[in-house]
Amino acid sequence: MTESGTDFNVEEIAERLESDLLEFLRSRSIAVESIELVGLKGAGDSSTVYAILIDGVYHTLKVYREEAAFQREIRHLRRQIPKDRSVLVWPASSNRFHYFIVIIEVPDGSQLHERMLSPIVSEQLSHCLIQFHSLRYRKSTVQPQQVIEVFDEASTDALAHAGLFGKDLDTKKLANLIGKAKVYVGANRSMFAVKRSRAHNDLWWANVIVAEEDVYMIDWENLGRDDYCRDLSFFRIMINYERTTAPVSMWDDEVDNIAFDTFYQPILERYVEVFDDHTFWQRYGLYAFQQACLNFSRAYYGDRRGVPASLAIIKTGMRFFEEYCLQAE
């Protein structure tokens, strides 16, 4: 929405938006013959994304609800988007709709879906992720106390949320595992002495686009520095996530953990090899639980309160912590 709180309705303004954008591009000496809004691609907490054809070439048009999120995206895009792909910034002050808009040239593709979980896509995604995470920051490492603080932040609301599921979720077990996770971090502080990497910080199925020739990531608003394991763990637990806009899920029916792990395991194993990471699996399991607790606690106040997808996320995190950290000791 805009600063005035008005919802962005593409159907109502499509014709004017297309003609105004065409005029704006030509005013900047960009030769364009035609513009066509194709349709809604998705919506997040701070933006709504549409597919748009400019002279037959696919672009994404992102409409931001807040100027701060718009400015962050611009800053990060200029660091991440290859120079051979165009990026157009259309400020709210330059259009009659008063929306903050970014337009990015992209290969025509679709958000990751279960029908795309093939060995070829796995290899392409592996290359994409490892190349992205290979930027390491020499003097920046993860602080164990910050890992513990996330558990502290999430625990109260996560346990309150657990109470909504009755026998489907053991609240006492969840509380016990949170306590064990904090102890585990304290007892394994050396495990976190790894250089931080460039991190996406919102890596989930909707932000992975599979095109005909490659796989790439979108949505750079939360770009930062972190342990790459946290990106990878978040991606794993979020295969359960369902949203309110189409496509709701990456699954046609039920979540298929076996299919996804068959797809994902070679990617994780390559990380261990490429980065010579001896504590990869322990951090992976710990972060899966940490991020699941955080997501589960925030869902207690949102539109995922008490829903099956939230239950699946927290139970996946609990299982991974037990398997990769507790049972490995």
Image: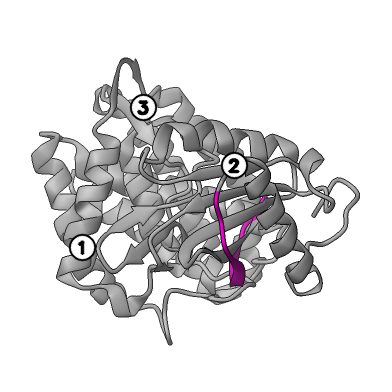
Furthest residue in direction bottom, as rendered: 253
- Residue indicated by mark 3: 186
Please state which of residues 40 and 316 is positioned toward the viewer in this rendering: 40
Total numbered badges shown on the rendered structure = 3
Q: Residues within 10 Å of mark 3 (few under 14, many from 20)?
A: some
* Discs 2/3, front: 2
On the rendered image, what quadrant is the C terminus found in? Answer: top left
Residue under pointer 2:
29
Mark 2 falls on what kind of element?
loop
Amino acid under label 1?
Answer: Ser
The magenta region covers 31-47
In the picture, the disc for residue 122 is 1
> Is residue 202 in view from this perspective?
yes
Callout 1: few (<14), some (14-19), or many (20+) C-alpha neighbours within 10 Å? Answer: some
Residue 25 place in picture, x, y as percent: 63, 48
User: Where does the image place residue 184, in percent across and percent down from the top left?
Assistant: 33, 35
- Sequence-wise, the earlier of marks 1 and 3 is 1
